[in-house]
Amino acid sequence: MSAEPRINDRIRVPEVRLVGPNGEQVGIVPIAKALELARESDLDLVEVAPTARPPVAKLMDYGKFKYESAMKAREARKNQAHTVIKEIKLRPKIDPHDYETKKGHVVRFLKAGDKVKVTIMFRGREQSRPELGYRLLQRLADDVEELGFVESRPKQDGRNMIMVLGPHKKKAEAKAERAASRDAGTA
């Protein structure tokens, strides 16, 4: 069954609740009379609520209706923000300066409204000390808590320990804020 509404001769019910071209209620009419009214007003008879009893049909220009609904769907897709998951990889014995650099990346990603997957890779004997990785992830979460929150707690996954941080701001809000600060800088 297609998502397209049935129009004109494809409507196979004895009677419909008819809605006029300006949204006014005409009432329950036989399908033949509804089709005749549609032809007279040079419009299409479109079934808008097929599950109602009796089905609801409206007099409208179907081509125009289809075009406008396609434009609305396109506009909705354009305004939709896709969530991106950025990934940062660390080692348990990370140097303080390297940690600050990685933390800076996490901060940048969270400010941009992206989620961040932080992975700690254990090698060799490091695998017997998962608490080092857990403490490092907790420290990172505490350092960036004003920008993001822990979406999934640290968990061991084979040789890796993974934690996901989510931003407090939505992607669209972060984009609008960046545009506003950019406009203020040029003015």
Image (cartoon, rainbow, N blue to C red):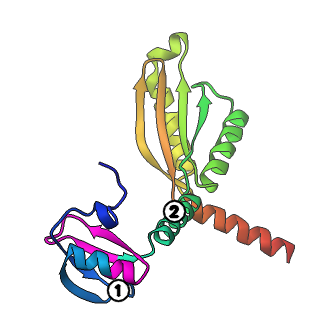
Q: Give the percent coordinates (x, y) of residue 25.
A: 26, 88
Residue at the location (31% across, 89% down)? 24
Residue 19 lies in quadrant: bottom left
Q: Give the percent coordinates (x, y) of residue 46.
A: 34, 70
Q: Which one is nearer the viewer's eye here, 112 or 49?
A: 49
Q: Which one is nearer the viewer's eye here, 157 or 14?
A: 14
Using the image, tell me which numbered label, if any, was put on residue 70.
2
Q: Earlier in the sequence, mark 1 or mark 2?
A: 1
Task: Give the tally of numbered discs.
Answer: 2
Q: Give the percent coordinates (x, y) of residue 160.
A: 49, 23
Using the image, tell me which numbered label, if any, was put on residue 140.
none
Mark-to-mark CA distance, 1 and 2? 21 Å
List the residue tagged with mark 1: 23
Residue at the location (50% across, 45% down)? 165
- Residue range corresponding to the magenta coloring: 37-58
From the viewer's perspective, tell me whether residue 93 is left or right of residue 63.
right
From the viewer's perspective, tell me whether residue 86 is left or right of residue 151.
right
Q: Residue furthest top?
A: 124
SS under mark 1: loop
Q: Quadrant of the C terminus?
A: bottom right
Badge 2 local density, few (<14 within 10 Å), some, or many (20+)? few
Confirm whether the magenta stretch covers residue 187.
Answer: no
Confirm whether the magenta stretch covers residue 40.
Answer: yes
Image vertical order of residue 8 relative to residue 166, above or below: below
Q: Which one is nearer the viewer's eye here, 7 or 101?
A: 7
Image vertical order of residue 43 relative to residue 104, above or below: below
Residue at the location (69% across, 29% down)? 95
SS under mark 2: helix
Residue 59 lies in quadrant: bottom left
Q: Which one is nearer the viewer's eye here, 36 or 6?
A: 36
